[in-house]
Amino acid sequence: MLVGWIVCAVLATEAQTTKPNIVYVYDPLCSWCYTFDPVMDQLHDKYKGHVDFSVVSGGMIIGSRKKPVSFMEEYILAGYKDMENLTGIKFGDAYLALVKQGTDLLDSEKPSNAVVAYNALHSDRILEFVHELQSAYFLYGNSLNQDSTYLKMAQKFQLDGLSFLGQMKSDSIQKSTQDNFKKVEDSGISAFPTLLLRINGKVLPIVEGFEKFEKLDKKIAKLLKENK
């Protein structure tokens, strides 16, 4: 079911090329995805010449799961140091202050709209956008519910801020975001980040959850070699 959905999703949303395609299923509010950003950078730097990269937002916190961050405060503050020690990635003091303040709403929808909107404009830079968006939250403590965060993002990526906000709020972008959420839910994906490799009409699992570059590099090289 997972493989079948990813094939359909990529066929429906990505231009077809002869290159293999690494599909990154993630969520903007996923802290493990934030720590995974440098790994994705390393993978992109190594494989970008002969592998395409796609990003799908998974809808980790939507609907009835939307809560003030205070709902997760104890869990976040108890676990972030372990994540830092494992991955070497630091969470910013401003983010921790936002968590302790407690009122910011955990909601994957608006940042996912931003990802879909930017992907429609510059899919070749989507990983860079995803990483900057997560840094805005997990490092600099900017709320992902505020328009001001996306105006700053637009400026950083040389976009007209008001036009970008308008695109984020458009019916077509919001529908695409909701369609992605539904497809991820129906697929049974239960862990973010998840990586899959689309190659020669097949979609192959690479990893579910965080893994370091060295192990992933070996897995991807093996899959590419075996499926030429």
Image (cartoon, rainbow, N blue to C red):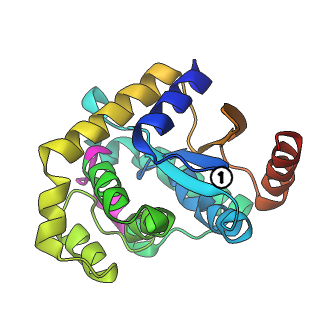
- State whether residue 2 is above or below residue 69: above
Locate residue 51 relative to residue 108 in the image: left or right: right
| Residue 103 visible to an observer of this rendering | yes
Relative depth, front residue between 131 and 179: 179
Q: Element at badge 1?
A: loop
Q: Which residues are magenta?
A: 96-109
Q: Residues within 10 Å of mark 1 (few under 14, many from 20)?
A: some
Give the residue at mark 1: 19
Relative depth, front residue between 28 and 139: 28
Residue 137 drawn at (x, y percent): 38, 65
- State whether residue 33 is above or below residue 62: below
Relative depth, front residue between 69 and 180: 180
Residue 79 drawn at (x, y percent): 58, 51
Tell me which amino acid carries mark 1.
Lys
Q: How many numbered circles are shown? A: 1
Q: Residue at x 67, y 49 (%)?
A: 20
- State whether residue 4 is above or below residue 132: above
Q: Residue at x 58, y 63 (%)?
A: 37
Q: Residue at x 32, y 61 (%)?
A: 118
Q: Quadrant of the C terminus?
A: top right
- Residue 182, magenta (yes or no): no
